[in-house]
Amino acid sequence: MHQTEPEAVRAPLFDVDAAAHKHIGARPHDEDGVLLRRDLGLFAVADGAGGENAGNVASSIALASLARHFEATRDEIVNASVFDVLGLPTAARRLSSGFQRANKEVLEIAHSSDRYRGMGTTMVAIAPSPQHALVHVAHVGDSRCYRMRQGRLELLTMDHSLANEVLELRPDLPEAQAAKLPRNVITRALGMSEALRVSIRTLDLAPLDRFVLCSDGLTDVLGDDEIADILQMTATAEDTAKTLLARALAAPADDNVAVLVVRVDAAPGVTAIPKRHATRPPPSRRPDSGQPRAIEDDAEIMLIEDEDEAPDIVIVPAVAVRGEVLSALKDSVSGPRPRPVVDEGRFQDDGPTLIVDGEEVDGE
């Protein structure tokens, strides 16, 4: 199995600077929030919704919960390998776990009082790993993260919006029907459901990279070209954040605006940044049992469908469905969503029934 050094063993290759500014805009309530924790290497923006003070509560809870998760796992990440047994970045899983914890806390408060019922929030966050020249980006909703590198602006997140759902699921939707759809509607948010899907990715870092995290109050009034122009004419994180906010308010912005800028540069004494051709290690190998290995030993396709809140897991080829596979699936898919069944399955309230080719299978 491929082994890597723990997260904090190496000296940092990068210095990280950050600055944030926000404004209520033309709204009666400020529902945007910003988290800037240099000590944790954690930076986030959240945009709440829910009316009155509920939106502010949702965004505040989400950001505070994310920070507490990073505080609680600070010692654990120091001793962790950079990549886990699945080849996933450990720090990325930590960030995603923080989103899941935040979602649970927002839901708990939303269910505790009619005043907060139905509140939710978007959130976008980055967690740089300066020791390994990596940055981990996570988001839910339409709060965005951009990266400026060598004069080129790139959007690192894809809005979880109704428009993008149409692009993915109904690209052939007639224009007349598309014109009737509401704009600026998001399809994922913290506080909406116990089953939250967090979009997350890991990228390399390069000297003078700058990241812009923002609520839609900024992107509703500034196009990507204008954001890029501001990044090119400002040097420090403070100047960039201040200028972006000022330009949005002059537009003028009719929504809350939150901007957080993170700038990285080579740490003192670092003259060369190691090139990374991939952000994950070679695949780990299973121990050799000495027995011939059949092609069917491993599943090649697993399709998880979640229609009517009764997920089915279809495994191809069916011969790959073994007891250990089913047991692992039960552990990984269980939780707030119903437990899985396999192939023409059925869902039972008293526990999972695992069925392959119409026959019940014991997955223990």
Image (cartoon, helix red, strand yellow):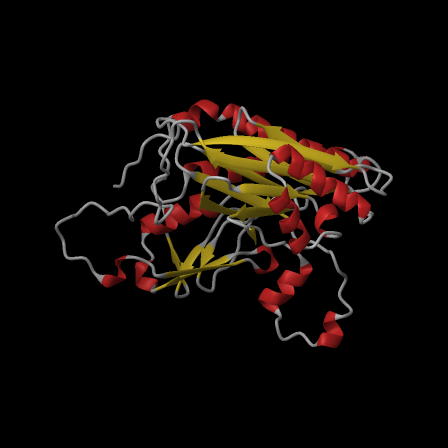
Question: Can the viewer see residue 107 in this picture?
Answer: no
Instruction: Please identify the quarter of the rendering in which residue 322 is found.
Output: bottom left
Q: Residue at x 41, y 32 (%)?
A: 13
Q: Nearer the viewer, residue 288 or 219?
A: 219
Pinpoint residue 57: horizontal percent, then vertical percent: 74, 33
Q: Residue at x 61, y 59 (%)?
A: 308
Figure quadrant of the N terminus: top left
Pinpoint residue 67: horizontal percent, then vertical percent: 59, 28
Q: Is residue 71 left or right of residue 329?
A: right
Q: Nearer the viewer, residue 338 or 349?
A: 338
Instruction: Please identify the quarter of the rendering in which residue 300 is found.
Output: bottom left
Instruction: Please identify the quarter of the rendering in which residue 125 is found.
Output: top right
| 16 to 25, vertically: above or below | above
Q: Nearer the viewer, residue 250 or 184?
A: 250
Q: Is residue 158 left or right of residue 291?
A: right
Q: Residue at x 55, y 47 (%)?
A: 148
Question: Can the viewer see residue 91 in this picture?
Answer: yes
